[in-house]
Image: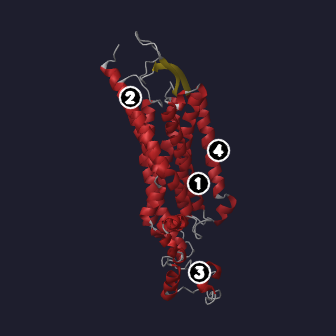
Amino acid sequence: MGLSPEEEEVQRLYGEGKTFLLVTSIVFATFGIPGNILAALAVRHRKLRDTDLTMYWVSLCLFNTLSIAIYFLRHFTSSIVGKDVKDLTYYMCGIWILLCHLSFSIVSWHHVALVVNRTLYFTLELKDLQRKWPPHYTVTAICLFCGAYNVFITNFGVTHTFSERPDDGQQQNGQNREGEVKYEHFVTCELGPSKLWPFLIFFFNAVLPAVAVVVLNLYLMHLKSHPTSLVIKRNGPSSISMRRKLMKIIVIYNFMFVVSILPFYIVNFTVNRMLPATSTVKESKALLALHTSQALILANQAAPLYLSCAYSHRFRRECFQFLLPVLVKFNPELEQYRMAAYYTKEDSEGSFITKVSDFPHCLKQNYQTPVQDDNWKPTENDLNLIRSSTSV
């Protein structure tokens, strides 16, 4: 017995959804996981590594990595075993819903922590606050509170349904059709049937963080338009420049977060489904829109490194310095940058390495380390000598 036109359309959309999930999971894992790790390492600069802003940024990158890894493991494994791992058991179904919403929730509230930190930086002196409430306390509180909230919602709000579908991937809602004997049994689960539970997730994970991010950024724009209300910081000029660059990157990233998180939860709240197998064309199209909006979130989570490198020359330089030992193995000619790359005119205080042991052997006997002169900077002749001595 053949399939009806509607059933063929459902099967086609279901196959497209599976392909879309597999491709996006591979792309985001390939570029997002290394990118977030490198973005976290790029802010290791000595003028920023101990600041609270860097702590939040590094933590956000790590949780972005975790969220992308969860997405990748689910859909890549599903393509191997032939079925969604969320459908395998009763408990696995609820666990994947929890992991999905929990990872998005923690990332959302990290954005709020970043913009709150920026607001306090421009309005208060943070030294006493940092001693009483260090940044890692805030990160821990975010993880614990988001974990408790999402566990509560999924524990009481998830409804399980036992269904079956033919082995061709077409769901039949547990009803046999004459002439078809082989069915695949699986478990579906969703937040419901009441709209209260999806709304609570939608409000806490998307609406509240997005509103907080928008309101606080508008407040900061108001403060910057009235400079007399700002607290003047007495840090070095290089530290201020680096921090301001990171803050501008965070503003752009906050905007990208709002644009990406709201569509996913709006579609999820409307469709109220998390399973890539539905029985009608309308539901299948809505579910494909849900996958697209989820991919938009993952694209935002994969963006920190590329956004930072596109905006800041210093981030590009920091990433290059970190990758230089690896790149040298493939191209030995890059060895000449090992010494000269430590110095940049962008840093007014200089970060040139001055230990004799770090210079080539031919320079060690004649080179005098300027330990006493804090204002010393290498001349152009010094840099040319180092480059020529290290060239291959």
The mark nearer the N terminus, 4 or 1, is 1
Q: Label 1 amino acid?
A: Ser
- Asked if labels 3 and 2 touch by Cβ distance under 8 angstroms, the answer is no
Q: Quadrant of the N terminus?
A: top left
Marks 4, 1: nearer the viewer: 1
Whichever of callouts 3 and 1 sits on the residue coming sooner in the sequence is 1
Tell which tag, 3 or 1, sits nearer the viewer: 3
Judging by the rendered image, the residue that carries numbered circle 3 is 360
Tell us which disc is closer to us: 4 or 2.
Answer: 2
Residue at 65% x, 55% y is: 136
The residue that label 2 is drawn on is 284
Q: Position of residue 43 (x, y in %)?
A: 55, 64
Task: From this view, report whether residue 71 is shown above or below residue 310.
Answer: above
Q: Which residue is mark 4?
A: 144
**Residue type for callout 3:** Pro
Mark nearer the N terminus (1 vs 2): 1
Identify residue type, mark 2.
Answer: Ser
Q: Which residue is mark 1?
A: 59
Label 4 and label 1: CA atoms lie apart by 14 Å
Q: Between tags 2 and 3, which lies in front? A: 3
> In the rendered structure, which disc, 2 or 3, sits on the residue that comes first in sequence?
2
